[in-house]
Image: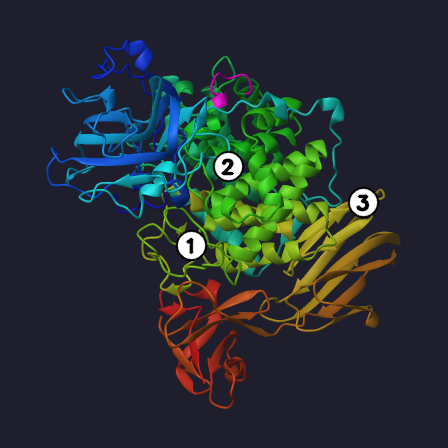
Amino acid sequence: MKRNWRRRQFLAMGGAFAAIQSLPSFAGTDSGTLDAALVSRSLGRMAFTPATRYRPYISRTARQAETTTWIQIDLGVSTDLDCIRLYPAFHLGQEDRLGFGFPLRFKIDLSDDPFFGNPVRIVDYTNGDCPDPKDLITEYLVGKKRARYVRLSVLKLRQVSGGKGFNFALSKFEVLHNGENVIISGGVTGDETLARSDDLSQLIRPQRPMGEEVTTDNIENLIPRQRWSAVNYRATVPLRGVTVQEGVFHTALEKNIGYLLSSFSVEEMLRPFRERAGKDVRRGLREPIPFWDTELLGSSAGRFLMGAGNTLRWVDHPELRNWMDELVDGIEECRQPNGYIMAYPEDSIFVSERGGYTRAWLTHGLIEAGYAGNAKAFPLLRGYYDWFNQSPYLSKLLRLATQGVQGMVANTRMFFTPVGKPEDIELVQRYFQENYWLEGLSKHESNLVWQYPYDRPHNYLITDFEAYLDMYRATGKQLYLDAVNGAWDLYHTNWEHVGGSIAITEFGEFPPQSYRLLAQQPFCETGETCGSVFWTKFNQRFHLLDPEQEKYVTEIEKSIFNVVLANQIGQNGIIYHARLVGQKGDLHNPLCTNSCCEGQGTRLLGSIPEHIYSLAPDGVYVNLFAPSHIQWSHQAQRIEIVQRTMFPLGPEVTLQINLEHSQFANIRIRIPSWASNEMAIFINDQRVATGSPGTYVSLKRTWSPNDTIKFELPIDFKLSHYTGIDKIPGYERYALEYGPILMALTGSASAVLKVLDGARHEDIVKQILPDPDDPLRFQIKGHPEYSYVPYWKVLNEPFTCYPCVTV
């Protein structure tokens, strides 16, 4: 295992085209010799099955290959049969999908006798080894033979991956009559030696909603363009004009610039583009980082462009801009005549996550570079998508490219750029849209999240929701909006930790409201930085559609404070998980490996200023509280709001309105949902309004030069009882928030707090005392060995965001 690897690495990703193997002929012993062409055929490649509900059946492990095992199907009644289908078990290798457990030697018999006294042999691989089908579904024709029982007998097992023992594995077994699978529930048994009786039902699981194969081409999903009814945002993101001044956000922006300029050189980021184009590569560059640089070719360039492009909209930094422009120039120099610009060869799009992840990253990056003022970025993207939208790979990108769902948002974001085309949306409708998923999400079916049928379920599914919300904006079709509203509710209710980090990831089981705090297995922790970035972008779309709904900004605020700031380790890197118990990641050697969380983390860090304010046709929304100012044009006049505050170090906020002439405008002030009570608002020291938590107060008036708005944020403590899967027997655990800020108890990862005066666990809040020397550090009466600090300020010390509390 490579020391710096994270996330998907222990499953080395792949997906290159596999040559379809022709299976050797075999004889039916009781029915005469059958023509091989009529006996077996490949039905195509199978979609991956990692979710536990769809995982393969795997027998016990034997020491010898020549060990027998069998499974038997009872159809309930004697039936004329068309064929039998075997769906292989496979995992993702570096260059291909690698089958495992398919029997080396086996036979399939039919009978009306459960003891198979007079069997009819359908498949006979008893005298020679069967080739490994890898991910190919194989159909064996029966020829309308009648039987009630079907038995697959394994005579020789295939070796387990890694060489330790031998076993039998299949993803699914089907017996068909008139094209329909006729296996009944509970109709499978197995031998007593190797069969796992409690797991045999996996063999006869229901078919997945869109079938088992990798091809998706649903032309019927296309909505005629004349029936599109675009939905406009009611608020817009300021593309520039926001300046962040000295404070928490300013520090984060500066650290992010340092990270971008110290992690990878322009030549290192351009290397895969140059190699693909056959151009010279400068000598002496550091070796590519396994997986992140070798499998996801070009994602490092996307990472840099996402972070730099966003940052340069707010900060004038010549060196950062030069790097960005040089990188875009280098990509342009490697562009093919057909417009192709990716760093991997066209025909390797199915390797690993290139078709979705890598494509989306470079798309995001060039979009941000375009908005930052690079004149080449948008034309480069348009040329590429003119190629991509006609490419021969589209019908298999969703299922054959690992986690292909990630590619949707690249197309929908492309549509909303200055060079977008309707084809960018139509491609998603035809090749990516999953109607069963849209319908199920709208009905709040949680299994469609944690048991997503076609790939590893986790926070990357949020990128789908981003794309479907874009689809609603493009077409106005209600099915998209209903689905994403359901998706928001599902994640918020079932997979969001206190503090806002996302409580689902890959390589594990995360049932609704499991809220895992500890790794279930290696590489199986929650709180990925990238998940919170996707959640932020998803909520930003909702906010812009319905800006009066304050809850979306609360989600953005929590993601920034409690994940992205918390995982930024100086300018040395962005760590992977927002661990809530124990210690943070390797802070002495933080990630600088182009990981998914670095790429998305630098993207959000660079875009923090766009979340402080939103613009509306009649004015502005003040969403977040940070020392900053915004300038924008309103009714042909330049208006500036200067926000002065120490928040989160203090609750006072002053907004000064700067303009040349008096002007009517609607300035909306957010009253956070975390506010402990109503909030009074003063204009020029006169109380003019009172707002309730979770709302915006609209200040509609004609503003004069130097008018001021003042308010004090009602910030207080909130204690939340832990109800997830990592409870500690005999104890109750609680998380503490201070306004939007998740607090961490430092001093021990297994701290127990005793309530001194009170009969309730909640009374522990009465023992929290402010530190006079640090406005965000708190002592606990009766426990001088511990302190509460904001989670985002924790560094090397042991801590817990969920201490035990006893009465």
Query: Where is residue 750 shown, x and y percent of the image?
Result: 35, 73
Real-space Cα distance between discs 3 and 1?
40 Å
Question: Picture coordinates of residue 398 (x, y %)?
Answer: 48, 29
Q: Marks 2 and 3, how far apart in space? A: 30 Å
- Along the line of sight, which residue is nearer the eye, 131 or 317? 131
Task: Reply above or below: 282 against 604.
Answer: above
Q: Nearer the viewer, mark 2 or mark 3?
A: 3
Q: Quadrant of the N terminus?
A: top left
Q: Amino acid at mark 3?
A: Pro
Where does the magenta region start and end? 389-395
Dot placed on the residue nearer the N-terminal end, 3 or 1: 1
Which structural element holds mark 3?
Answer: loop
Residue at position x 50%, y 22% from top? Answer: 394
**Residue at which label 1 appears:** 526
Is 350 in the magenta? no
Q: Name the residue that disc number 2 marks.
A: 305
Q: Residue at x 45, y 32 (%)?
A: 358
Dot 3 corresponds to which residue?
617
Residue 373 shows in this picture: no
